[in-house]
Image (cartoon, helix red, strand yellow):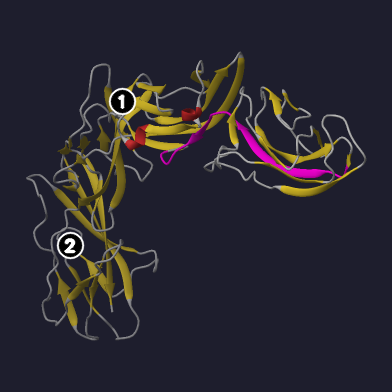
């Protein structure tokens, strides 16, 4: 978890003054005694943040000394940066070599006088450091799409405090872990912005650590930032026009159309996705994406869902990818059974939901009926058809009062009573060109 850091160089409060009465003790070194002193002591500065490797300029404001020399000392709990000390004249001396926020109390005394005056100081020593901007620390890009350095997205980090530099500063930026996506570059501009630019050429997630280092007066002040770039495949179009209705036993072929552009050194590859599998008898050409073959099954219970994935490969990585989900429904050789049947008022309803699709007839008890199929779909000369009734998953056996002509497919019988339902399957076997194909259709008589 990364958060925008607080601005440690923001001006800090440093203006606590103390007025104290120092009583004369009958003379004293460092100046003539004029009796008691009413001393006012404080540190007041326009800016209480100072760059590292510089002298913090906290100026004491002293009033009421009447020419006497002050003697200042730090209280034990007070803090100062390394390289900085407090002089007896209440001024800070030295070069701050460490960063942080420092505070404490300074006690002022005057020789020959009793009592002290005290002042609080608070200031910070800062060095520029790297931190994420609104675009970071996680960035998502699209493969093959250029990222302009002038884009707001390209500004992935910023060096806070960069503008508070001193002459002679040297700045460097490098990666200490991970690598950039191929085709991309990282640089630090003159305003302290960390810019990512270029065109990513390979999809993946790239986790890296950036390190910014300030070199000032012979010392180095590094800071690091964890960052990630996710390069996703470009969304593309893949269409199979007319797919995917075909006929059982009839050779078929569907070739896709796509807007995928294959560049130099790239390969287009097609494969089945994780959703479903091709119906029996069909294949997928991995080079062209063509779905071809001769469906071995069919009918209203043969709806099959699957997906085809097209990928552009380069140097072992995926440059672009698209997945197309398809529903394949090989149509059986059944004809349409009529809505009315000879000698009855029978009719049927199709269940239009998910498979198995079922034809439902409602027949009167005690009335003989005959139901014949219509012309076969995609019939060819030399086709041989054989019909039979089989049990369904709900009822393992076919009622004895139902019969079917094995050659014509005519279903007939007399329903003995109006109670219960008959659930069964009509199975058709087509023999064509020496190969046999089987198709089932679900039925119900209520």
> Between residues 212 and 30, which one lies in front from this camera angle?
30
- Rendered image quadrant of residue 67: top right
Residue 267 image point, x, y percent: 27, 22
| Residue placed furthest toward the left | 381
339 vs 425: above or below: below
Residue 109 image point, x, y percent: 83, 38
The residue that label 2 is drawn on is 409
Position of 72 with respect to 311 (left or right) is right
Q: Are marks 1 and 2 in contact (CB under 8 Å)?
A: no
Query: Callout 2: helix, strand or loop?
Result: loop
Residue 192 image point, x, y percent: 44, 28
* Magenta highlight range: 114-135
61 vs 180: above or below: below
| Residue placed furthest toward the right | 26
Majority secondary structure in the magenta region: strand
Q: Is 116 inside the magenta-drawn segment?
A: yes
> Between residues 22 and 256, which one lies in front from this camera angle?
22
Q: Gap in Å between the C-alphas at discs 1 and 2?
A: 65 Å
Position of 374 with respect to 230 (left or right) is left
Q: Which mark is residue 275?
A: none
Residue 175 can be seen, yes or no: yes
Residue 34 image point, x, y percent: 82, 41
Label 1: how many Cα within 10 Å (few below 14, some 14–19, many 20+): some
- Rendered image quadrant of residue 125: top right
The residue that label 1 is drawn on is 199
- Sequence-wise, which precedes: disc 1 or disc 2? 1
Position of 361 with respect to 75 (left or right) is left
Query: Callout 1: helix, strand or loop?
Result: loop
Q: Is 369 inside the magenta-drawn segment?
A: no
> Between residues 292 and 239, which one lies in front from this camera angle?
239
Q: Residue at x 64, y 29 (%)?
A: 56
Quadrant where the N terminus is found in the figure: top right
């Amino acid at each position: 978890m990364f958060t925008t850091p607080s601005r440690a160089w923001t001006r800090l409060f440093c203006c606590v003054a103390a007025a104290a009465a120092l009583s004369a003790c009958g003379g004293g070194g460092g100046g003539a005694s004029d009796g008691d002193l009413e001393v006012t002591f404080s540190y007041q500065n326009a800016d209480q943040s100072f760059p590292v490797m510089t002298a913090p300029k906290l100026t004491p404001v002293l009033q009421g000394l009447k020419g006497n020399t002050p003697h200042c000392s730090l209280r034990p709990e007070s803090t100062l940066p390394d390289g900085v000390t407090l002089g007896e004249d209440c001024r800070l001396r030295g070069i701050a070599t460490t960063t942080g926020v420092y505070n404490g109390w300074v006690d002022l005394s005057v020789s020959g006088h009793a009592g002290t005056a005290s002042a609080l100081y608070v200031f910070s020593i800062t060095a520029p450091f790297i931190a994420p901007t609104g675009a970071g620390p996680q960035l998502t890009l699209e493969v093959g799409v250029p990222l302009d350095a002038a884009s707001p997205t390209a500004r992935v980090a910023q060096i806070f405090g960069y503008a508070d530099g001193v002459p002679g500063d040297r700045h460097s930026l490098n990666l200490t872990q991970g690598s950039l996506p191929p085709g991309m570059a990282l640089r630090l501009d003159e305003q302290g912005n960390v810019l990512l630019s270029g065109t990513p050429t390979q999809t993946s997630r790239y986790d890296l650590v950036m390190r910014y280092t300030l070199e000032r007066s012979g010392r180095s002040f590094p800071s690091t930032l964890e960052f990630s770039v996710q390069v996703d495949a470009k969304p593309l179009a893949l269409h199979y026009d007319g797919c995917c209705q075909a006929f059982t036993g009839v050779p078929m072929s569907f070739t896709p159309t796509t807007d995928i552009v294959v560049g130099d050194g790239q390969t287009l590859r097609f494969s089945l996705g994780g959703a479903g599998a091709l119906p029996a008898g069909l294949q997928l050409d991995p080079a062209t994406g063509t779905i071809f073959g001769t469906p071995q099954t069919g009918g209203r219970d043969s709806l099959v869902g699957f997906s085809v994935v097209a990928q552009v490969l380069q140097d072992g990585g995926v440059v672009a990818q698209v997945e197309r989900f398809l529903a394949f429904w090989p149509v059986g050789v059944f004809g349409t059974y009529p809505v009315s049947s000879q000698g009855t008022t029978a009719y049927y309803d199709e269940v239009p939901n998910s498979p198995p699709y079922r034809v439902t007839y409602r027949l009167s008890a005690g009335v003989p009926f005959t139901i014949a199929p219509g012309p076969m779909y995609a019939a060819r000369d030399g086709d041989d058809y054989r019909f039979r009734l089989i049990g369904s998953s709900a009822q393992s056996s076919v009622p004895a009062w139902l019969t079917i002509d094995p050659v014509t497919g005519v279903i007939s019988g007399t329903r003995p009573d109006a109670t219960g339902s008959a659930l069964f399957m009509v199975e058709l076997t087509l023999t064509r060109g020496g190969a046999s194909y089987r198709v089932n259709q679900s039925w119900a008589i209520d």
